Amino acid sequence: MTNTDILLEDLEDVLDDATSMPMTKKSLVDVEKIKTIIEDIRLNTPHETKQAKAIIDSRNTILDDANKEAQAIREEAQAQARELVARDQITQTAQAEAAEIIAKAKEEGEAYVREAQNRASEILGNATTQANEMLASAQKNRADIVKSVNEYTENTLISIDDALYRALQDVRKIRNNHKNNPGINK
């Protein structure tokens, strides 16, 4: 499980622990906790990118190793071929064996390179897919949080507006009562 996955679970926990507002489907959330988790996700995203780079570097190392091994096999085959050619009695046989060894070495070397390239491509593809999925998930969670915060803010402002409206009505009633009954308060 990556750090980003853990942070996303923490974010879900904060949302699950949110206090419900009576008579609405809305909940109160700890905005500071959510902002902290979002910041941690942002800080972790470069870490995931570094992991993908490490996989690419690993792929390059595998390719280099395969090329070096193929080269070593070729050089060994060439050395064996030269040794066989040096023997006068079996020169023709040596040349045939040398050609066979070189062809086999080349074939094996190319097979190692293909295998390493396929493996590296698979690793890179998986890392890219995983990074894209994590980024998409983080962006969706961010959008959901922003939407929730905006809804909470809107509901809070509506509640304040209603309270101010009622308070203003009460003040107007008191004022009207005072105007209509000026002797009561004297």
Image (cartoon, grey):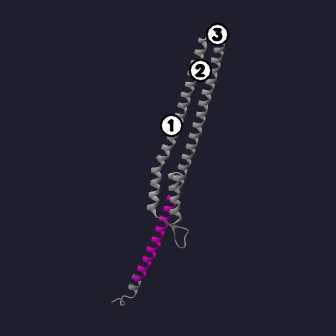
Q: Nearer the viewer, mark 1 or mark 2?
A: 2
Q: Is residue 182 left or right of residue 156?
A: left
Label 3 element class = loop
Q: Main secondary structure of the magenta part?
A: helix
What residue sits right under mark 1 in the picture? 57
**From mark 3 to mark 1, how far is it between C-alphas?**
50 Å
**Where residue 16 appears, x then y in whole percent?**
54, 64
> Does 164 appear in magenta?
yes
Residue 107 relative to residue 186: left or right: right
Q: Residue at x 50, y 59 (%)?
A: 10
Which numbered disc, 3 or 1, marks the residue that appears first in the sequence? 1
Disc 1 versus disc 2: distance between alpha carbons?
30 Å
Residue 128, given in percent of the width and then of the height, sits at 55, 43
Please name the residue that numbered disc 3 is placed on: 89
Residue highlighted by disc 2: 77
Say which element carries label 2: helix
The amino acid beneath tag 3 is Gln
Percent across and percent down for residue 47 are: 47, 47
139 relative to 56, above or below: below
> On screen, 168 above or below 35?
below
Q: Nearer the viewer, residue 186 or 62?
A: 62
Q: Which region is colored magenta?
A: 145-174
**How many numbered circles does the render carry?**
3
Report the front residue among 13 and 91: 91
Helix, strand or loop at mark 1:
helix
- Report the side of 58 relative to 168 (left or right): right
Task: Identify which amino acid the numbered label 2 is placed on.
Answer: Ala
Q: Nearer the viewer, mark 3 or mark 1?
A: 3
Three-letter code for the amino acid on which mark 1 is drawn: Asp
User: Which callout, 1 or 2, points at the residue further toward the start of the chain?
Assistant: 1
